[in-house]
Image (tube, grey):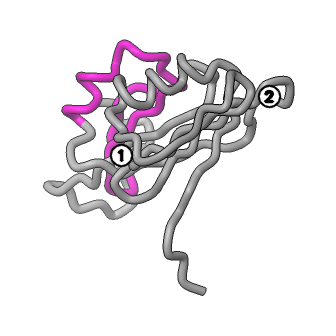
Amino acid sequence: MQVNEFRLKLFVRNFENMREFYTIVLGFEPVGGWDNGPDDCGVLLDTGSGIVELISAGSEYKLVQGCDVSLGVDDVWKLWEELKSQSIVHPLRQNYWGDSSFCIRDPEGFRLTFFSKDKARVTDGSQSEENIL
C-alpha cells in the first residue's frame, strides 16, 4: 500500500488557542478549513510532509493519551532555542541512535517530539540515551 497523504486529526477543546499555537508558535501554514460556528470549525495545516487537521470537538473532547507525533526538522538545535519556553516533556538531548530531539506539549497536552539526525556523529549504540546537550 502506498499512502499519498498523511493527516493527523486533533479534536480540540479550545480551537482558537490551538490554532494560534500551531500557526504562530510552530509556523504551520493553513491550507484549508471551515467555520460553521464554535462547535463546527476546523483548519488544515501544512507541516511540509503532512497535514495537521485541528477540529473543534465541542462536547466530544477527549484528551489523547498514549500517543505523540515525531517531526523531523532541518535544525532541531535552532528550533529548541525558539520553543524551549513551551511546556517541556524532555529538553534537547542527543540520542544514542543518532539524532537529537526534544519534546513539548501543545496547549491541550498533546506531545510533539522534534528531531534532527546528528550529521557529525557515527553511532554504534554504545552511547547513553540520556546524553543531554
Check the image and name the residue furthest to the left: 120
Q: Position of residue 125 (x, y in %)?
A: 39, 59
The answer to whether 66 is drawn above or below residue 21 in the figure is below
- Residue type beneath disc 2: Tyr
Tell me the CA gap for discs 2 and 1.
29 Å
Q: Quadrant of residue 86?
A: top left
- Residue type beneath disc 1: Phe
Asked whether 17 or 74 is in front, the reply is: 17
The answer to whether 107 is drawn above or below residue 56 in the figure is above
Earlier residue among tags 2 and 1: 2
Magenta range is 77-106
The residue that mark 2 highlights is 61
* Residue 90 is one of the magenta-drawn residues: yes
Asked whether 7 or 111 is in front, the reply is: 7
Q: Quadrant of residue 107?
A: top right
- 27 sits left or right of 9 in the view: left
Q: Which residue is located at x 36 percent, y 31 percent? A: 26
Q: Position of residue 80 (x, y in %)?
A: 29, 28
Q: Assign a secondary structure to mark 2.
A: loop
Q: Which class describes the residues within 10 Å of circle 2: few (<14), some (14-19), or many (20+)?
A: few
Q: Which residue is located at x 32 percent, y 56 percent? A: 98
Check the image and name the residue furthest to the front: 36
The residue that mark 1 highlights is 115
